[in-house]
Image (cartoon, helix red, strand yellow):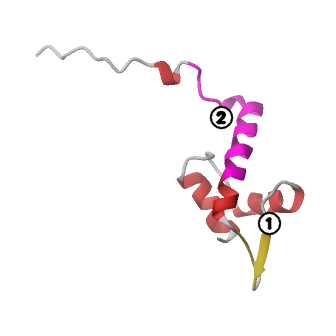
Amino acid sequence: MTFREAARRVVQEGIAPSMSHQRVSQLARDDEDFPPVQKIGRSSVVDWVVAKPYFVAHAQRAAGRDSRRRIPRNEGMKSHESTPDES
């Protein structure tokens, strides 16, 4: 898939809160761990099956550096019990 589609899917699947095709291009250029890139015409493409785990790991590392992306510790421990409404 194109870098533009990969960026859209990163956000759509909730891997990261935002991602642009420019950022995908930058990662492909600068990160030696980025999955293999193919050129089709003027577009750069990457296999999503290989790229998705890369983006998940990248988002986890980014969350570790950026407190705004962290999930609060008690987020997963919230009680789902509710009291019935009294009418």
State the image coordinates of residue 40 (x, y, percent, origin top left). 74, 82
Mark 1 falls on what kind of element? loop
State the image coordinates of residue 74 (x, y, percent, origin top left). 53, 18
| Quadrant of the frame with the C terminus | top left
Dot 2 crowding, Cα within 10 Å, few <14, some 14–19, many 20+: some
Q: Which residues are magenta?
A: 53-73
Res. 84 image quadrant = top left
Mark 2 falls on what kind of element? helix
Q: Is residue 83 left or right of residue 61?
A: left
Q: Is residue 39 above or below residue 25?
A: below
In this rendered view, identify the residue nearer to me: 49 or 1.
49
* Residue sticking out furthest to the bottom: 41
| Quadrant of the frame with the N terminus | bottom right
Check if mark 2's residue and mark 1's residue have beta carbons within 8 Å. no
**How many labels were placed on the picture?**
2
Badge number at residue 69: 2
Which one is closest to the eye, mark 2 or mark 1?
Answer: 1
The residue at the point 70 percent across, 35 percent down is: 63
State the image coordinates of residue 72 (x, y, percent, origin top left). 59, 23
The residue at the point 89 percent across, 57 percent down is: 30
User: What is the CA distance from the residue labelled 2 to the residue labelled 1?
Assistant: 27 Å
| Amino acid found under the numbered disc labelled 1 | Pro
Indicate yes or no whether the magenta region holds residue 64: yes
State the image coordinates of residue 24 (x, y, percent, origin top left). 75, 60
Badge number at residue 36: 1
| Amino acid found under the numbered disc labelled 2 | Arg
Q: Is residue 58 left or right of residue 30?
A: left
Indicate yes or no whether the magenta region holds residue 50: no
